[in-house]
Image (cartoon, rainbow, N blue to C red):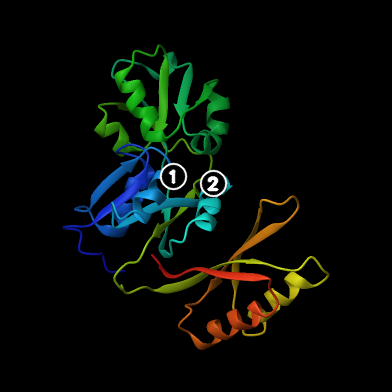
Amino acid sequence: MDELSASETRVAFQGEPGAYGEEALRVLYGPDVEAVPCPTFRAVFEAVAEGHVDSGVIPVESSLGGPVAENVDLLLEHDLPISSELSLRIHHCLVAPPGLALEDVEQVLSHPQALAQCAGYLRRRGLRPVPEANTAIAARRISREALPRTAAIASSLAAELYGLVVLEDGVEDSSDNYTRFVTLGEEPERTWKRRKTALALTVPNEPGALYRVLGAFSARGLDVSRLESRPQRRAWEYVWCLDVEGALEEARVREAVQAAQAACITLRVLGSYGVA
């Protein structure tokens, strides 16, 4: 993968400096990119849509916690193409202000996903989980506020940024802990080892409708690597989101999408992009 020239590139992420979103964007764009923190995921989308930044990075799926439903819905709501993907290995640390010993910790702040990914560790230690908006926000809060007997789960980068001590490293319950991030907006072409195409579609409520869509890809030897449904505004009607291995520029992928479209009510390409 080739890094983009980052000298004038501004990329938005959700949270505070030290969040995993910032770590992901620096892997994708290099250390010199200007990372722009946003308070919410919606704010990331709006910053890209309104041209305040060149791109945005959002998490869409955790290998342990599953899809990030809010961001899947925001992808459906906005007309911003997915331009690249990164699976980032997540290393959680138990961090605390200097002087707080591990045996004195009673409660732990972090994002709900991070708390869920460390639930077994927290139970074994007898630590009470307290949800916070973001892992880096949790780290910043315990650094700035005199919260008694309180630690946070965050990255080692967040600990360094906010002057915290790492009490324990690798506190996630599984070593196979990854988060899939995607970038939003148009990008210059790079060199990728793999390409994928993301689609969102609706099908008639009749037997075999989804089967016919999936058959269009199977018949051409294409792997559908992800399939999930999201509710629409009307009760019990759904949008199906799927990822297909291969670029839309490839003839068989393009033909499969065209064949699938004939079996759909609606079909939208969310992006055809490279995988880091």
Residue 74 shows up from this direction:
yes
Residue placed at 38% from the left, 53% from the top? 57
Where 42 sits versus 210, above or below? above
* Label 1 element class: helix
Q: What residue is pinned by disc 2? A: 70
Residue 232 location (% of width, % of height): 66, 53
Contact between labelled residues 2 and 1, with CB atoms less than 8 Å apart: yes
Q: Is residue 256 left or right of residue 181?
A: right
The amino acid type, in three-letter code, at marker 1 is Phe
The one nearer the camera, 109 or 44, is 44
* Label 2 element class: helix
Q: Is residue 102 left or right of residue 36?
A: right
Residue 209 location (% of width, % of height): 76, 72
The tag earlier along the polypeptide, 1 or 2, is: 1
Residue 145 location (% of width, % of height): 33, 16
Where 180 sits versus 269, above or below? above
The CA distance from mark 1 to mark 2 is 8 Å
